[in-house]
Amino acid sequence: MKIVAGALSGFFVVTGLLWLVVPDFVARQMRMELLTGDGLTTQIGDLAAFFLTLGGSIAIALITMRSVWLYPPVMLLSFAAAGRLIAWSVHGAGLTLDMIVFEIVAAALLVFTAERMPEAGR
């Protein structure tokens, strides 16, 4: 489980950093155009923060061996996936369905990992 969680952490951190360095990195996954001007800055910042929060939370959980750090990214993934699924079904825009499924699977893996992670001090 540590390997799976570590791989997810690395994936999210790298993706967040790529959003900061290469703004159109995820544009291939999106059906809508990237925003322009201040909107683009906000979009990049939001997505980078999203991925960096997920990756950082997982890394902290692995280092401290306290599963409580995994629940914020689980909630973040779940809310994001639900919102994107609604937007995708209503407007046909946003992340593609395979990316939404990926978020749901990632949240399930985090819950699975958290349930099996021994808490420090037990």
Image (cartoon, grey):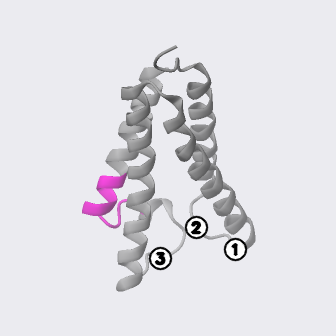
Please report the residue visible at 38 percent of the width from the left and 51 percent of the height from the top.
52
Residue 11: name its quadrant.
Answer: top left
Q: Is residue 51 something that shows in the picture?
A: yes
Q: Amino acid at mark 1?
A: His
**Residue 44, percent from left and from top:** 38, 68
Residue 61: name its quadrant.
Answer: top left
Q: Find residue 33 and name its label.
A: 3
For mark 1, give the secondary structure.
helix
Please report the residue visible at 43 percent of the width from the left and 75 percent of the height from the top.
34
Q: From this viewpoint, which residue is outermost toward the front?
A: 121
Please report the residue visible at 54 percent of the width from the left and 46 percent of the height from the top.
72
Q: Find residue 94 and name its label.
A: 2
- Asked whether residue 18 is drawn in magenta, I would say yes
Q: Report crowding for label 3: few under 14, some 14 to 19, many 20 or more residues within 10 A (C-alpha).
A: few
- Asked whether residue 86 is drawn in magenta, I would say no
**Residue 40, percent from left and from top:** 38, 78
* Region in magenta: 16-26
**Residue 79, percent from left and from top:** 64, 56
Q: Amino acid at mark 2?
A: Gly
Q: Which residue is mark 1?
A: 91
Q: From this viewpoint, which residue is outermost toward the left?
A: 21
Q: From this viewpoint, which residue is outermost toward the top?
A: 122
Q: Amino acid at mark 3?
A: Glu
